[in-house]
Image (tube, rainbow, N blue to C red):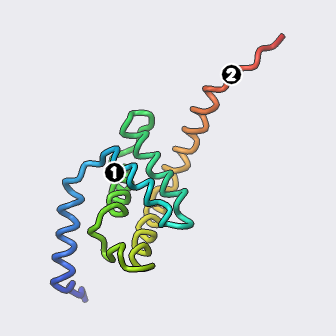
Amino acid sequence: MLKLMKPRYIVKALALYKVYKSYRLSNKDLQKADSLSANLKAHADNFKLLISMANDTVKGRFTMNKWNLSIIVGTIVYVISPLDAVPDIVPVLGWLDDVTIVTYALTKLQKEIDRYRNHVKQEVESKLPVPSSR
């Protein structure tokens, strides 16, 4: 049997939906997300990778489908937004929900992350000087 959500959770869920539905990620948001990544402890590097993926996609240096990009944008917006399931001012628990969201995104995007890492590796290798044979 389906259990109904409490009215206060429905109101909060609708407020989050309205914020995320109309939100456009900016460079300032990406910078803020990067500065907040330290709060994610063990997931800080992975979160920074998601930020890089979003940044490179927006700038046209990497392509991914809209669904995967929406997962990344939603994750970044959730981490930087003051409208969380558990507000970040609550010690420990405030960042635990953010870590959970980042972990979910990393799990869902594993193939895309691998593809992005290969893309970055190829970009770096293509910029290396070719040794001349004498």
Q: Can you identify the residue that label 1 sits on?
A: 29
The amino acid pointed to by label 2 is Pro
Q: Are marks 2 and 1 in contact (CB under 8 Å)?
A: no
Examine the image and state in which quarter residue 92 appears.
Answer: bottom left
Residue closer to the observer: 42 or 58:
42
Q: Residue at image x 44%, y 53%? A: 34
Relative placement, left or right, of 18 versus 125 is left
At mark 1, the secondary structure is helix
> Left or right of 85: which side holds 39?
right
- Classify residue 71 as left or right of residue 118: left
Residue at image location 25% in from the left, 48% down from the top? 24
Q: Nearer the viewer, residue 112 or 28?
A: 28
Instruction: Please name the residue that numbered disc 2 is placed on.
Output: 129
Label 2 or label 1, whichever comes before in sequence order: 1
Residue 74, position as x, y percentages in the image: 33, 58
Q: Check the picture and name the quadrant holding the N terminus.
A: bottom left
Q: Residue at x 33, y 63 (%)?
A: 78
Residue drawn at x 52%, y 57% is 46
Q: Where does the image place residue 133, in percent across and percent down from the top left?
A: 81, 13
Q: Is residue 128 above or below residue 95?
A: above
The spot of residue 119 in percent (x, y) is: 54, 38
- In the rendered image, residue 102, in percent from the top left (x then y), is placed at 44, 64
